[in-house]
Image (cartoon, rainbow, N blue to C red):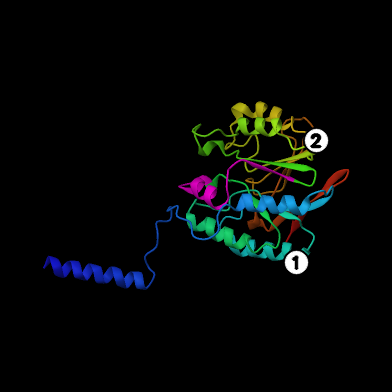
């Protein structure tokens, strides 16, 4: 009887597997397809913009579960033909499931220009942080586009309960200590802005001090808020631009000029 039951179970498993019903656990961290995208795309951005003092990039954010809109914005950006790269403000996932990162990667890989993705708070759920690091890369990273250093920070403090340095001041100090000679200006990008419940507001003044120490600071960028915002969080003259969510069908086009910059809100 036991042998008969075992045979029935084995047959059922084989049948299900043949129909592709069985799948990995949603938080399985095994990755199929391309990985290490941040490092690869940073090289492409730096090569593409080397020596430029004027360039243009797009910012999109919070594409979680909005695959139709993500596909549409990829189409729109590709059609323009004047975008050097794309900055994603974080939250490619909603529940931190592995397949969400893979879906987002596959949509974004259709861009005809390189892109980088910041880490969002929803990207940290479940095993999302581990998957993010495999698919994209480190949670804090920087690159130089033309003569502008982009410092991209993990500011999702609430997700770590002090088990991980957020914001990572050591990373910021290392950036300042090893500043590239060609970088005359700085743009700081993050997902969660200062003052938000997800931010570690115990260190917000220290954060301001580090951010304003970067050479030629132009402005800061953030996502998370799902709305257009333009604010000075510290009354220090530094403008923080918040990008709306793809779910509300908007994105930024930002043009860096020899003297100054332009920020354009785009709705689609």
Is the residue 61 above or below the residue 108 in the image? Answer: above
Kindly tell me whether residue 87 is visible in this rendering. Answer: no
The residue carrying mark 1 is 79
SS class, disc 2: loop
Q: Is residue 141 magenta?
A: yes
Q: Which residues are magenta?
A: 124-144
Q: Give me the residue at 48% from left, 56% from top.
A: 31
Image quadrant holding the C terminus, namely bottom right
| Residue 101 seen by the camera | yes
Disc 2: which residue: 216
Task: First in sequence, mark 1 or 2: give its number.
Answer: 1
As helix, strand or loop, the secondary structure at mark 1 comes to: helix
Q: Is residue 24 magenta?
A: no
Residue drawn at the location 78% of the way across and 51% of the way down: 49
From the viewer's perspective, is the residue at label 1 or at label 2 nearer? 2
**Which residue: 38% across, 68% down?**
21
Instruction: Give left or right: position of 161 versus 1.
Output: right
Is 129 above or below relative to 194? below
Residue projecting furthest to the left: 1
Residue 179, given in percent of the width and then of the height, sits at 73, 35
Disc 2: CA contacts within 10 A as few (<14), some (14-19) or many (>=20): some
Q: In this rendering, is residue 154 above or below 123?
A: above
Where is residue 117 shown, x and y percent of the image? 63, 50
Q: Residue at x 58, y 53 (%)?
A: 92
Can you give x and y, in whole percent of width and height, for residue 59 in the image? 71, 52
**Quadrant position of residue 171:** top right
Q: Quadrant of the N terminus?
A: bottom left
Task: Report the Cα–Cα distance between label 1 and label 2.
Answer: 32 Å
């Amino acid at each position: 009887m036991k042998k008969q039951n075992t045979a029935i179970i084995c047959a059922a498993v084989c049948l299900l597997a043949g129909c592709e019903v069985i799948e990995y656990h949603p938080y399985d961290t095994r990755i199929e397809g391309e990985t290490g995208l941040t490092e690869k795309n940073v090289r492409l951005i730096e090569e593409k913009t080397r020596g430029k003092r004027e360039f243009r990039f797009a910012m999109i954010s919070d594409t979680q579960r909005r695959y139709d809109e993500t596909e549409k914005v990829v189409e729109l950006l590709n059609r323009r033909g004047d975008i050097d790269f794309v900055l994603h403000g974080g939250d490619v996932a909603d529940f931190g499931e592995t397949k969400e990162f893979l879906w987002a990667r596959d949509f974004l890989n259709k861009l005809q220009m390189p892109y980088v993705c910041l880490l969002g708070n929803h990207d940290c759920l479940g095993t999302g942080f581990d998957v993010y690091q495999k698919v994209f890369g480190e949670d804090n990273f920087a690159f130089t586009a033309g003569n502008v250093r982009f410092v991209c920070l993990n500011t999702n403090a609430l997700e770590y309960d002090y088990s991980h340095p957020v914001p990572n001041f050591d990373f910021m100090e290392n950036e300042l200590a090893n500043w590239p000679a060609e970088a005359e200006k700085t743009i700081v990008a993050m997902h969660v802005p200062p003052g938000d419940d997800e931010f570690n507001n115990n260190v917000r003044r220290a954060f301001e001090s580090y951010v304003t120490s970067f050479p030629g600071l132009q402005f800061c960028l953030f996502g998370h808020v799902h709305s257009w915002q333009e604010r000075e969080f510290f009354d220090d003259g530094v403008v923080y631009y918040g990008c709306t969510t793809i779910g509300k069908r908007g994105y930024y086009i930002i043009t860096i000029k020899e003297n100054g910059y332009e920020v354009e809100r785009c709705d689609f």
